[in-house]
Amino acid sequence: MADRERHWRATRRLTATLLLAWLVTSFCAVFFARELAGFTIFGWPLSFYLAAQGASLAYLAIIGIYAWRMRRLDQRHRRHRERD
């Protein structure tokens, strides 16, 4: 039972951390958009790139990290269950 609790604690911790990363990414892209609009890349404001591509890439990275870490956590939990 202790192994199952450790697994769920690690799962909740990972989920909370990645949700915080999602929140920070979403908040910063919007909150700092006005200040970042002064910088341009190829004639477009930096805030446009952050909102259009940067946030999307960050979300994709969050999904990838979640899948990778959960696979490792589930494999570790499965090994401990088979051992016991």
Image (cartoon, grey):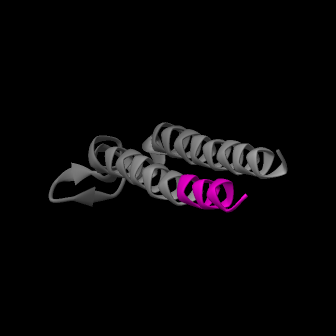
Instruction: Residue at 56%, 52% (x, y): give it.
Output: 74
Question: Which quarter of the picture shows residue 48?
Answer: top left
Question: Which quarter of the picture shows residue 43?
Answer: bottom left
Instruction: Residue at 65%, 46% (x, y): give it.
Output: 11
Is 53 situated above or below 73?
A: above
Q: Main secondary structure of the magenta part?
A: helix
Residue 7 image position (x, y, % from top left)? 70, 49
* Residue 82 covered by magenta stretch: yes
Residue 84 image position (x, y, % from top left)? 73, 58
Horizontally, residue 25 falls left or right of residue 17, namely left
> Depth check: 49 or 13 in front?
13
Instruction: Residue at 35%, 42% (x, y): give it.
Output: 51
> Depth check: 2 or 70 in front?
2
* Residue 9 covered by magenta stretch: no
Does the image show residue 59?
A: yes
Horizontally, residue 31 falls left or right of residue 62, namely right
Does the image show residue 37?
A: no
Quarter containing the N terminus: top right
The residue segment tinted magenta is: 74-84
Horizontally, residue 84 falls left or right of residue 24, namely right
> Depth check: 42 or 8 in front?
8
Residue 10 image position (x, y, % from top left)? 70, 51
Residue 44 image position (x, y, % from top left)? 20, 50
